Image: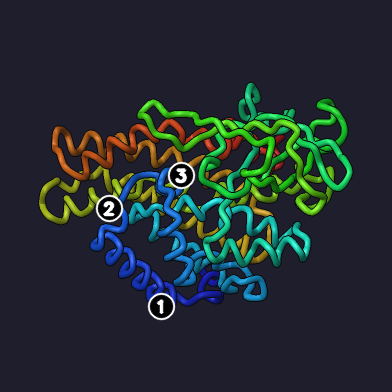
Amino acid sequence: MTRTVSAVAPEPAWSQLRRQVRDFLAEEIAAQHFTPGIDGWLTGWSDTFSRALAARGWVGMTIPRQYGGHGLSHFERFVVTEELLVAGAPVAAHWIADRQVAPSLLRFGTEEQKKELLPAIAAGRCTFAIGMSEPDSGSDLASVRTRAVAVDGGWQINGTKVWTSGAHHADKVLILARTSGTHADRHSGLSQIIVDLNAPGVSINPIQSLDGGHHFNEVVFTDCFATDSDLLGTEGQGWRQVTAELGYERSGPERFLSAALVVRLLIEHIAAGNLGAEPVLGHHLARLHGLHQMSLSVAAALHRGENADAAAAMVKMLGTTAEGDLIEVADYLIGSRNGPLRDAVAQARVQRPGFTLRGGTNEVLAGVVARGLGLR
C-alpha cells in the first residue's frame, strides 16, 4: 500500500501542500475570518470561506480540468481535508458537493450535467444537500417512500426527507426516490434526481438540535417538478448508484477527525506543560494514526477506481467510535479547567451522539463489512 501511495504523490509534495494549507488557515484565523469549531463539515457553513478555498484550488481538486476542476489525486485532496478538519474550519458549504455529488456526476452524469454543475462546484458556487433518509425508516434506506412519477418533460415528486444537512442553505438536493416498482421490490425501481431547493413545491422545515443549533432539516416535496435532464444516471438504478457513492461518504478523515480541534488543543496544552502526557491519551492517538492509514488506503482504492464499500464502512465504524472515546478521555483529562479547550470539548460532547448515526449506524455498517468479507 505504501508503495502505491508514494508512486502517486511523493511525501515531499504532500508536505509542501500541508504547509501551504496550514499557512492559509493561520492567516484566516488571525484575520478572524472564522472561529475554529467542532464538526465544521456539518455545522460550519460559510460560502465566503468555501469560495476562498476554491480560489486556491482546494475545492473540486479531483474534478478533471476539462470540467473546471484541478485534475489532482485523491491523496492531495486527503491532505487538504485533514488540515481543514484539524483547524476546525467551516467547510460545510462545499462539503457535500465536493465529497459526494461531484464523483457521482463524473460516474453517472450526462455530459450536459457535468459541464453545467462541475465547474460551479469547483468554484464553490453550487452547493448541495443529500436527500436519503425518510421519516419512520431509521437506517433502512431501501424503504424509500418518496415517489417521482413520470410526467410530460420530467418527474412529479411527492415525499419527505429528514436529517437533510444544510438544506436551508444549499442550492440543490440530490434525492433518492422511487420511480417504478413497489416497496416489495426494495432495491429496484429507485432513481436519483437533482432538485432545485428553490423550486415550487419544496418546503424546508428546520430540525433544531438540543443545543439550539440548526443543521438538519425536513424537506417536503409536494407535486414538485424536476425535468428529464435532472435525472442522474439511469432510471431504476438509483440503489446501485447510491451504494457506489457511499464509499466517498464513509471513508474520509471526517469520520475520525470531526472533533480534531480537541486533539490539537490537548496536544498544545501538553506541549506547554499545562497537562501531563497521560499514557491513555497516547493510546487514543495511536488509534487515530491507524485510522489515518486505513482512510488513506481507501483513498488509494478510490484513486484506482476500485470498489471500497466494505473498507469505507470499516473506517466509518471504527473512526466514529474512536473519536467518541477520545472526547470522553479529553473531558476527563482537562477536569475543571476553563478556556478554549473546555469550550471545544463541550461542543464535541453535544455533537458526539450523531457521530455513530449519520452515514449509517454502526449496526448497519457491521452488516456491510460482513457482506464484504463474505460472512453473510
Q: Residue placed farthest to the top in the image?
A: 136
Label located before the other in sequence (3 or 2): 3
**Height in image: 311 above or below 346?**
below
Q: Is residue 21 found left or right of 140 in the rendered image? A: left
Seen from the viewer's position, the closer of residues 129 and 22 is 129
Kind of residue at badge 2: Arg
Residue pointed to by mark 1: 12
Please say whether residue 148 is visible from this viewpoint.
yes
**Distance from the alpha carbon under mark 1 to that under mark 3:** 31 Å
Left or right position of 341 against 186: left
Name the residue at 57% across, 31% down.
218
In-image side of 11 versus 115 (left or right) = left
Would you say residue 361 is visible in this rendering? no
Crowding at mark 2 (Cα within 10 Å: few <14, some 14-19, many 20+) = some
Sequence-wise first label, 1 or 3: 1
Say if 374 sits above or below 267 in the image.
above
- Reading the image, the residue beneath label 3 is 42
Amino acid on which the number 3 mark rests in the picture? Leu
| In the image, residue 101 above or below residue 132 | below
Q: According to the image, label 2 marks what residue? A: 264
Tell me the crowding category of disc 1: few under 14, some 14 to 19, or many 20 or more residues within 10 angstroms, Cα based: few
Residue at (62, 44) in percent of width and height: 198
